């Protein structure tokens, strides 16, 4: 190992943990300062009246990215937490009570397309072929940076030749004609904060990311993954301070040299890794006198993802007879394009509802008290620039969502709720320090991707690195774990990469 460095990591989301574990396993002295009282950031797990509610990510894919972290530390992931595969991946409701089972196996999904829209079967197969190709083309870029514009320009001939510069919805619409099928083929950008009508199809690689490695559930919820990674960090000799927000990154001669804590002490470090949101960090954690004016102009011109209202609720009964599955997408039946515009560009709460309903008790009894059921319902809403007064609008909106669930999917729901908690854009802004309360930070459009996305090494300050959703390669658990890998390797390229990549497992019989 080269010189043992003193490294500070700000924040313990998946991106921060990924970098911190790699660097601690490589023998560096790593300290995490975390604002909240537990690990996980967006993946924080709430424990309320005996229910466990995963705060954010529930769809766990690419488990080899976790395995790599354990392997680098000489450990086994299975000794820390267990994963079970889920299939169907999603049950997608069309707004008229009918559900499409979105299976890992393509032939099974094709059979579902045949059931809903027989004329779209051939088009669906071509669409899947297209996204497989996108995956093969772009997967390597999810684990490396674009060091200069020329390296990014190399992808452009492919993007123009294949039409994958088009929006995910536009690309899907070339192949499938039915409105619901178009939604089924183009919802994935929403998982990383992108508007399907704006997000280029290069993000369609997520579709095959899921098929390649499956969708998994961690026993005990995503909280078990967070705890498993936290324990691994401690086992590697790392140190964490909870309830300790970093107030300022101390800059000397354009170099990040330490962090200032709430009690005024300054902790010095050789390198600083920010898992705090990139735009928030530049604007609120680095003194204005230390940052060049162009940084503010750059951030002021960025586009940000949507935000979310998420309500976690536990019932005193099980809904085993409902036609629902572990992961449910409950789409509205209104005008989809208009609905997305209201979410991404609007100034008020959308009338239509597009919801994700998580029902982990379907897979894991331990997540709720005996005979009870644990849920979360997620709704897409505009970020704070919309000017919505969430103190007033929040409770009424949550009630609207629960009423909708009660009427369409979970009879008599409100009479059975015995635990409840909600978050809205104010949570993202004030608890998680996310700029404008965006749930997925910087929006994934073409001009904010690859070389144009905030880089993993600061272009302004030496010894300052960024990991997490607002940086390359983007939002979502696999991406932020990859960002931690990229940043850690920039700081210490010495440790051998522990690649646990598994070969392609999916095939299309067409
Ligand atoms: C509701 C929801 C559902 C999602 N579902 C999925 C899913 O199913 N699958 C998937 O792959 N992705 C999902 N995502 C996206 C995914 O959760 C995120 O992209 C990812 O977890 C973000 O990780 P991160 O590394 O950027 O860190 P974050 O989770 O954003 O954590 C950053 C940490 O930094 C801390 N911090 C910030 N400022 C400071 C400071 N000044 N000092 C100290 N600490 C600080 C915060 O407290 C926080 O703990 C979901 C996101 C949300 C919100």
Image (tube, rainbow, N blue to C red):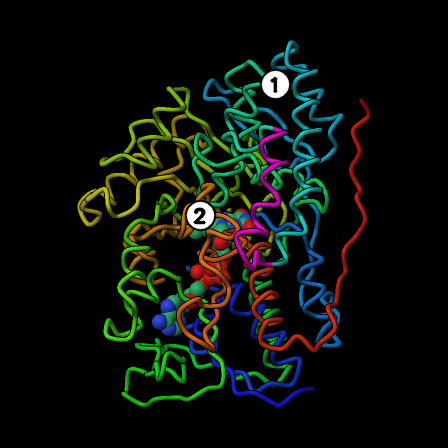
Chain part drawn in magenta: 145-162
Q: Residue furthest front?
A: 150
The residue that appears at 61% across and 12% down in the rendered structure is 117
Residue bearing mark 2: 448
Q: For this view, does 105 lie left or right of residue 164?
A: right
Q: Is residue 389 above or below residue 170?
A: below
Which quadrant does the N terminus fall into? Answer: bottom right
Whether residue 371 is visible, yes or no, is: no
Percent coordinates x, y for residue 453 in the rendering:
46, 53
Q: From the viewer's perspective, is 391 left or right of 54?
A: left
176, 263: nearer the viewer: 176
Q: Does residue 239 belong to the magenta stretch?
A: no
107 relative position to 253: left or right? right
Choose between 23 and 295: the one closer to the eye: 295
Q: Residue at x 71, y 20 (%)?
A: 111
Which residue corresponds to mark 1?
A: 175
The answer to which image quadrant residue 429 occupies is bottom left
Number of disc labels? 2
- For mark 2, does the 10 Å Cα neighbourhood hold few (<14), some (14 to 19), or many (20 or more) residues? some
Question: Residue at (39%, 62%) from the top-left corner?
Answer: 278
Name the spot of residue 271 as percent of width and height, x first: 49, 81
Q: Are marks 2 and 1 in contact (CB under 8 Å)?
A: no
Residue 340 location (% of width, % of height): 37, 30
Quarter holding the C terminus is top right
Q: Secondary structure at mark 2?
A: helix
In three-dimensional space, the C-alpha distance between marks 2 and 1, rounded to whole angstroms, equals: 27 Å
Q: Residues within 10 Å of mark 1 (few under 14, many from 20)?
A: many
Question: Residue 220 is drawn in which quadrant?
Answer: bottom right
Provide the major secondary structure of the magenta segment: helix
Residue 153: in magenta span: yes
From the top left corner, tell me how far across and down residue 100 is, in percent: 60, 24
Which image quadrant for residue 157?
top right
């Amino acid at each position: 190992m080269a010189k043992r460095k003193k490294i500070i990591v700000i924040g313990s989301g998946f991106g921060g943990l990924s970098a911190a574990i790699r660097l601690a396993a490589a023998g560096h002295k790593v300290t995490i300062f975390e604002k909240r009282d537990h690990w996980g950031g967006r993946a924080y797990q709430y424990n309320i009246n005996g229910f466990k509610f995963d705060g954010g990510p529930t769809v766990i894919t690419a488990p080899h990215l976790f395995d790599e972290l354990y392997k680098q530390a000489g450990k086994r992931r299975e000794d820390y937490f267990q994963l079970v595969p889920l299939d169907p991946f999603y049950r997608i409701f069309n707004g008229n009570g009918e559900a499409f089972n979105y299976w890992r196996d393509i032939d099974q999904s094709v059979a579902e397309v045949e059931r809903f829209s027989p004329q779209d079967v051939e088009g669906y197969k071509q669409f899947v072929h297209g996204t497989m190709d996108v995956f093969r083309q772009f997967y390597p870029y999810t684990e490396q940076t674009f060091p200069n514009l020329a390296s990014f320009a190399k992808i452009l001939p492919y993007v123009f030749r294949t039409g994958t510069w088009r929006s995910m919805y536009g690309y899907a619409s070339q192949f499938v004609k039915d409105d619901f099928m178009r939604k089924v083929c183009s919802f994935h950008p929403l998982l990383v904060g992108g508007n399907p009508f704006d997000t280029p199809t290069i993000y369609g690689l997520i579709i095959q990311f899921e098929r390649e490695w499956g969708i998994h559930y961690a026993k005990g919820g995503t909280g078990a993954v967070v705890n498993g990674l936290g324990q691994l960090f401690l086992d590697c000799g790392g140190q964490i301070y909870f309830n300790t927000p970093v107030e300022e990154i101390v800059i000397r001669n354009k170099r990040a040299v330490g962090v200032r804590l709430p009690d005024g002490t300054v902790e010095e470090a050789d390198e600083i890794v920010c898992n705090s949101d990139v735009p928030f960090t530049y604007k609120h954690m680095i003194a204005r006198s230390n940052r060049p004016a162009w940084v503010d102009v750059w951030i002021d011109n960025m586009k940000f993802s949507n935000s979310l209202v998420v309500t976690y609720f536990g019932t005193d009964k099980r809904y085993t007879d409902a036609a629902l599955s572990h992961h449910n997408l409950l789409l509205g039946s209104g005008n989809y394009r208009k609905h997305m515009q209201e979410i991404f560009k609007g100034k008020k709460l959308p009338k239509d509802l597009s919801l994700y309903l998580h029902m982990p008790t379907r897979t894991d009894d331990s997540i709720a008290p005996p005979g009870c059921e644990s849920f979360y319902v997620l709704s897409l809403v505009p970020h704070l620039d919309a000017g919505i007064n969430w103190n007033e609008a929040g409770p009424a909106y949550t009630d609207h969502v629960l009423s909708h669930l009660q009427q369409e999917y979970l009879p008599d729901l409100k009479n059975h709720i015995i635990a409840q908690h909600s978050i809205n854009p104010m949570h993202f802004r004030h608890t998680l320090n996310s700029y404008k309360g965006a749930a997925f930070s910087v929006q994934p459009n073409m001009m904010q991707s690859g070389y144009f996305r905030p880089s993993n090494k600061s272009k302004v300050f030496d010894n300052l690195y960024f990991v997490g959703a607002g940086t390359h390669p983007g939002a979502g658990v696999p991406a932020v774990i990859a960002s931690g890998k990229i940043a850690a390797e920039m700081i210490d390229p010495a440790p051998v990469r522990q690649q646990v990549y598994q070969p392609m497992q999916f095939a299309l019989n067409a």
